[in-house]
Amino acid sequence: MTDTTKTAGDIPANKTEPTTEAAWLDPILRPIRAFRLAYVPVVMVYFAYGALGLIDVTRDLWIKESLALTPSDLAGIAVWLMLPWTVKMVFGELVDTVPIFGSQRKAYVLIGAAFMAAGLVILAGAAGQWLTFTTPERLYITGAMLMAVGTVVQDVVADAMSTEVVARIDAKGNERPDNVVRTELGMVQVLGRLAVSIGILAVAGLSGWLADLMSRQAVFFIGLIIPAISVAGVFLRGTETAERRPIDWRILGGGIAFGVVVMALGVGGIPFSQEIIFLISMGVVCYMLMLVTAELDHNTRMGILFATMIVFAFRATPSVGDGFFWWTLDDLNFDAAFYGTLRQTGAILSIAVMWFFSRQLTECSVNRTLLWIAVASTVLALPNLALVYGVHHWTEANFGFGARSIAFVDAAASSPFAQLSMVPLLTLVAYYAPPGHRATWFALMASLMNLALVAGQLQTKYLNDVFVVGRGQYGELGPLLIWAIVLGLVIPVGAIMLFGRKAVRHPTVKR
């Protein structure tokens, strides 16, 4: 195990720099050189996660066409769908401590795939109207929840494997240099995000084209190929772990009890149940993180805490909700095929940015990375605001390009940022993951980050309750979008100003 008495700032920088002649080639070759066959199971599970976007356009159109749900309802449902991610520590503890038929990796990937497949079949049955034992709305929630659980289980396994595939000890039994280990772990995280982006790319255009050409039911059935891909990745490379420890009932028992409370609040229809669950979740996850990080020295723990708070704030920003998507369909006449093209282009640029900036992402601080992403995201949200206020009519009359061109450029330019934002923190998490606790440690940090998304969805719901948008009712869309843009800048920048100097740094960051 690495020496945890050092903080990231104490670790000497990696002095290896590319030669001048090869400097331009280094960003292109770096991810290729970094790849190892041992990474195959990790990247294929992440690829499958991205490829789940195959059903996105079909699902969104089906919801608008066939379900009686408002944007505020959908934002509220999204909060519930995030809950499996907030109890990720339960799955992490199981993966770390409870083998199934002797397996702590393959068996859990299979279980996750089974949940995903069941969810897809339920969505197909709801869309095809051959599952009628309850309403389509409830079938949608059930199917989406099963898919969420399956994705979480597989993600836990992939996260654990991403910390194991980098050797901490060389062939002679000596500890490898800390900065080398962390840089390699950072590259695994970059490769994981690249795999997600490649998965998105593989199906982005197809998702729109299939929605345009095939029935909703058929597309959901086609989606069954996705869990099969994740299973194939794990079985292609015989990956398991030799690390095993006794069950920590503080984590597993506490997580299960927490899950029961969450289900009771959800089913009981208690007022402000989502807000109550969010507060309880924050308390539980933070307490468990204190338990798992007890081995780290105080300065490192505090540095990771402040870095985490910055990423949390970045991910806790609200979105505009589904109303904007509906408006583009009704007022701008965007269609499924066009949305497929948008996603295809965005996925290509996301991969390009991740690829060429892999070095900066693995070596720059959380502060610097998230500051420029927050500012860039705000600037790139302005074209959507311009569309809502009719600027596309003026551009079409004077310059010959209209709404589709503006939406195309905006979607393409803004697409990489969601994946970029997590890499610096994931690198720190992977580096400090203790043996025997890797899945639990990663799962707890992921739970906290997903609670940030819950906070964002709650804010989205509140904004949609204040600025009401519905099918054919888009008068409040402009103010709604303005507030979402402003909060998307103020919240993360404020966190960087408050906590940036105290956040742990990457070992190769030059002071």
Image: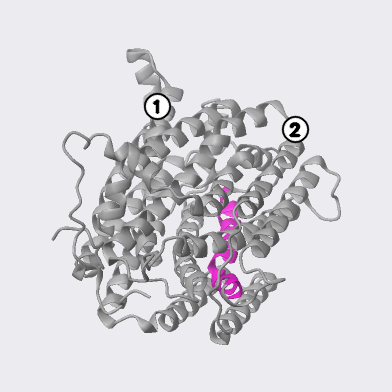
The C terminus is located in which quarter? Answer: bottom left
Question: How many marks do you count on the picture?
Answer: 2
The range drawn in magenta is 71-95
Q: Nearer the viewer, residue 235 or 189?
A: 235
Residue 74 drawn in magenta? yes
Callout 1 secondary element: helix
Residue 228 drawn in magenta? no
- Identify the residue at horizontal 61%, vertical 58% (top origin): 238
Residue 180 quadrant: bottom left
- Identify the residue at horizontal 62%, vertical 39% (top origin): 54
Image location (x, y in percent) of residue 285 = 48, 76
Q: Residues within 10 Å of mark 1 (few under 14, many from 20)?
A: some
Callout 2 secondary element: loop
Image location (x, y in percent) of residue 457 = 50, 57
Q: CA distance from mark 1 to mark 2?
A: 29 Å
Image location (x, y in percent) of residue 190 = 40, 50
Q: Residue furthest front?
A: 172
Residue 356 quadrant: top left
Name the front one of labels 1 and 2: 2
The N terminus is located in which quarter? Answer: bottom left
Q: Main secondary structure of the magenta part?
A: helix
- Identify the residue at horizontal 67%, vertical 76% (top origin): 264
Amino acid residing under circle 2 = Ser
Above or below 382: residue 15: below
Q: Residues within 10 Å of mark 2 (few under 14, many from 20)?
A: some
Q: Which mark is residue 215?
A: 2
Amino acid residing under circle 1 = Ile
Residue 331 seen: no
Closer to the chain start, of discs 1 and 2, is 2
Q: Which mark is residue 406?
A: 1
Image location (x, y in percent) of residue 76 = 58, 58
